[in-house]
Image (spheres, rainbow, N blue to C red):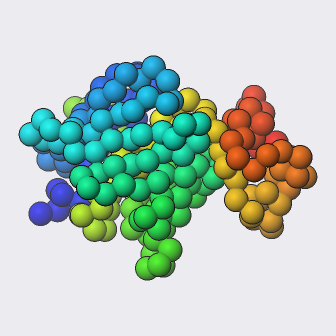
Amino acid sequence: MPKFNKMYFPVDAIAKHEDFDVWYSDGERALRFEGPWEKESDRIAMIGRMGGQIGQIRPDNKALNYYLRHDRFEYEFQTRVIKEHYYVEGMLWDIHGSVSKPPVDFFQIKKKKNEVHVRKTLFKDHGECFEVTARDTASLRIAVEATVAMCIKEEYKGLSDPDEDERGGKKRGTFGKFFDFIQPKGVPYEKLYDEEGNPLS
């Protein structure tokens, strides 16, 4: 059924710091996210349609990267540069972009194609929502979980872990000189961007 390759949740859901629902394209509830929503390090539960917990977003001890659990499987959501570059270990999803400036595509490295597309749209009577579309319906819940993780990271302006290209390669050259003087793990948001959100060189 076409409705099962797309899910929607409110754009302002994380900013409200409240539990929220995720819907299929026909308006039926698909998932619910629940948590304390007090700080980035909080664990967030993903609740299925029948009410049981089927997944969890669990930040590591520095809230640098997050572990995304779904049923028996766990994936690592890595923040290379917040609002710029993310990666989902286990799914081989390379993500360039930001939920603050969608659309965002999840590029599957091994298959060499985009598997997930995230955009903003008006959805039924729920207002402005993120629409998460997956080519493979089996990966849709993980895609939604990763998108929520990205929203959490950007809401709390957490740490980044830039890779080699972003430390001075051609792709992220403006960061080069700056990253020569900092530790490779746990770069604070304030050391990546100025007050207007522009990259610091």
The quarter of the displayed image where residue 28 is located: top left
Asked whether, in this view, residue 190 is left or right of residue 114, the answer is right
The quarter of the displayed image where residue 63 is located: top right
Asked whether, in this view, residue 81 is left or right of residue 17, the answer is right
Q: Is residue 44 above or below residue 7?
A: above
Judge whether residue 4 can be spotted in this image.
yes
User: Residue 181: x and y, percent?
Assistant: 89, 46
User: Residue 151: x and y, percent?
Assistant: 47, 39
| Quadrant including the N terminus | bottom left
Farthest residue toward the left?
50
Q: Residue at x 44, y 28 (%)?
A: 42
User: Residue 85: x and y, percent?
Assistant: 61, 54
**Front-lying residue, 147 or 185:** 185
The quarter of the displayed image where residue 55 is located: top left
Asked whether, in this view, residue 110 is left or right of residue 63, the answer is left
Judge whether residue 128 can be spotted in this image.
no
Q: Residue at x 51, y 30 (%)?
A: 40
User: Residue 12: x and y, percent?
Assistant: 41, 29
Please tell me how many numbered marks the rendered image carries.
Answer: 0
Q: Residue at x 17, y 62 (%)?
A: 2
Q: Residue at x 49, y 30 (%)?
A: 41
Asked whether, in this view, residue 161 is left or right of residue 22, the answer is right
**Front-lying residue, 187 or 176:** 187
Farthest residue toward the bottom?
111
